[in-house]
Image: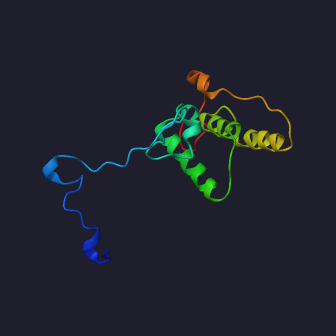
Amino acid sequence: MSTGPDSSYQEHSPSDPEDGQALRPPAQKQGPGMVAAQANPSITDPYADVLGVLSPQARRGLVAQLAVGFYDGWRPGRAEVVDLVAVKLGILTVDECERRKQLRDRGYQISDIDVTKASRKNIHPPHQEGRS
């Protein structure tokens, strides 16, 4: 068995322009009840419906916040992510969001906020200085 540099050379590969085939990732095997994995899974996948109510800019900001927190060891639950979205939408203040987290951490049952059904006309964005 050869171990030199030519031993792994293939004369014809799936990405050769001659055959018109593009290089594709290997097909994933699926059994009964298995779901195909996404090409680029994200830590935000379970929250897509909640994050979908945000503007693209607000969504990117929250995704960045979640990513930084994730690498720092923070694993927010769905209710906590919903509360963060509610803050972005102006439904909750940051203080209210923090208080709800503290109560949850102590074992209290906190009612969920349904941000997916929140009426946009009732949402007031947080006050920004310099704007009238």
Identify which residue, 24 or 7, lies in the foreground.
7
Horizontal side of residue 8 vs 88, given as left or right: left
Quarter of the image with the C terminus is top right
Check the image and name the residue furthest to the left: 18
**Residue depicted at 70% across the width and 40% down the height:** 80
Quarter of the image with the N terminus is bottom left
**Residue depicted at 52% across the width and 41% down the height:** 59
Estimate the x, y position of residue 116 in percent, counting from the top left: 59, 26
Residue 3's image quarter?
A: bottom left
Above or below 124: residue 74:
below
Residue 71's image quarter?
A: bottom right
Above or below 97: residue 118:
above
Horizontal side of residue 16 vs 132, given as left or right: left
Q: What colouring style does the render use?
A: rainbow
Identify which residue, 10 or 79, lies in the foreground.
10
- Count up the numbered dots: 0
**Residue depicted at 43% across the width and 44% down the height:** 28
Estimate the x, y position of residue 69 in percent, counting from the top left: 63, 54
Estimate the x, y position of residue 99 in percent, counting from the top left: 79, 42
Horizontal side of residue 102 vs 120, given as left or right: right
Horizontal side of residue 26 vs 79, given as left or right: left
Check the image and name the residue furthest to the bottom: 4
Estimate the x, y position of residue 68 in percent, counting from the top left: 59, 56
Above or below 27: residue 68:
below
Check the image and name the residue furthest to the front: 1
